[in-house]
């Protein structure tokens, strides 16, 4: 008998990546659909999965999202600046399939996948930070993702301003010049007119962005003391940026935290961290046999 098929959803603000998998090394089919309106996007998602006999779904979603199973809004996106998506019921869109559904943030999902199959195998604690259209972070301790009143919002930590970047107000609609408001992809384009990878290697933007990301890592290390911090996302694909962040972090940290020399790492799973995070959520949901249809 073949192993069960799992439906995987990496729900992003610009695109949804869908997958059918039997395991982390057996990804059978994938599909990308643009994130337009909830009705259109979730409808296309349902249609694509309908042709398959799915045993369980895993959804790793952009947020903020509601993760508390006692909350009637479980499985929904809330308080998002993404137009039209506040209150969107992503998990509910798959409830009619009648199978278990695992649901978490995209970064928590990626953190689970990296801890289980990627850069963090064997480590008890790991933080995954994505730097792209937004900045977010998720954490895993003892194999379990970190949840609280909601979930970690690491991209919204406050950072000190770089001395050569004191005027730009930041683009976060809630906090202005938090880490996300200063160092995500749109913030880079807003003040320098191009993505970081399009700017010359000696452009000051590289050092400034690394300065903010290194502070963010230091904040995380000071609070959580993880064994590994994985930095992923589109902006981190800029050649040399990871090395800039590592150097800036070690200067800032001053050797105080007792972390390993290779604390900061690229994703071991490459661009598959998010989708395999959804797979991990689906597999865990199937094992637990739990779902929360809406």
Image (cartoon, rainbow, N blue to C red):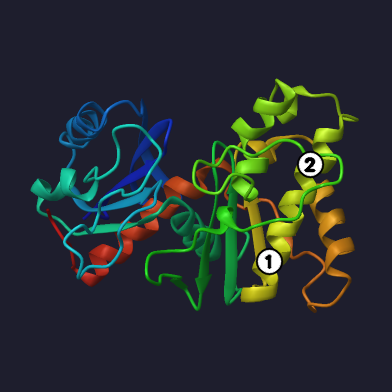
Residues marked 1 and 2 touching at CB (< 8 Å): no
x then y, percent, for residue 182: 67, 42
Neighbour tally class for label 1: few under 14, some 14-19, many 20 plus, Cα within 10 Å: some
x then y, percent, for residue 215: 74, 58
Residue at disc 2, secondary structure: loop
Residue shown at 25%/33% (left/top)? 38
In this rendering, position of residue 3 left or right of residue 189: left
Q: Is residue 144 above or below residue 93?
A: below
Residue shown at 47%/47% (left/top)? 274
| Label ID, residue 219 | 1
Neighbour tally class for label 2: few under 14, some 14-19, many 20 plus, Cα within 10 Å: few
x then y, percent, for residue 118: 58, 58
Q: Is residue 93 above or below residue 267?
A: above
Q: Nearer the viewer, residue 94 or 87?
A: 87
| Label ID, residue 166 | 2
Earlier in the chain: of badge 1 and badge 2, it is 2
x then y, percent, for residue 122: 60, 73
Residue shown at 23%/34% (left/top)? 42
In this rendering, position of residue 19 left or right of residue 40: right
Q: Is residue 288 above or below residue 237?
A: below
Q: Nearer the viewer, residue 180 or 281?
A: 180
């Amino acid at each position: 008998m073949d192993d069960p098929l799992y439906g995987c959803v990496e729900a992003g603000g610009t695109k949804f990546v869908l997958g059918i998998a039997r395991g982390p090394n057996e990804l059978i089919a994938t599909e990308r659909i643009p994130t337009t309106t909830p009705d259109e996007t979730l409808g296309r998602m349902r249609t694509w999965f309908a042709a398959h006999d799915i045993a369980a779904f895993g959804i790793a979603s952009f947020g903020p999202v509601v993760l508390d199973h006692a909350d009637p809004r479980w499985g929904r996106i809330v308080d998002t600046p993404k137009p039209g998506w506040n209150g969107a019921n992503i998990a509910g869109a798959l409830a009619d399939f009648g199978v278990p559904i695992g649901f978490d943030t995209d970064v928590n999902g990626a953190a689970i996948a990296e801890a289980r199959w990627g850069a963090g195998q064997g480590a008890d604690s790991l933080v995954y930070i994505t730097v792209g259209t937004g900045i977010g972070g998720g954490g895993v301790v003892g194999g379990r993702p970190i949840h609280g009143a909601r979930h970690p919002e690491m991209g919204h930590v406050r950072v000190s301003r770089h001395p050569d970047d004191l005027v730009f107000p930041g683009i976060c609609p809630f906090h202005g010049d938090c880490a996300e408001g200063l160092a995500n992809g749109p913030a880079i384009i807003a003040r320098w007119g191009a993505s970081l990878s399009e700017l010359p290697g000696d452009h000051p933007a590289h050092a400034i962005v690394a300065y903010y990301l290194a502070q963010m890592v230091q904040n995380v290390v000071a609070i959580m003391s993880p064994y590994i911090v994985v930095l992923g996302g589109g902006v981190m694909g800029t050649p040399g940026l990871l090395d800039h962040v590592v150097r800036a972090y070690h200067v800032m940290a001053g050797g105080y935290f007792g972390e390993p020399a290779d604390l900061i790492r690229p994703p071991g799973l490459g661009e598959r961290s998010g989708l395999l995070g959804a797979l991990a959520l689906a597999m865990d949901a199937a094992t637990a046999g739990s779902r929360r249809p809406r």
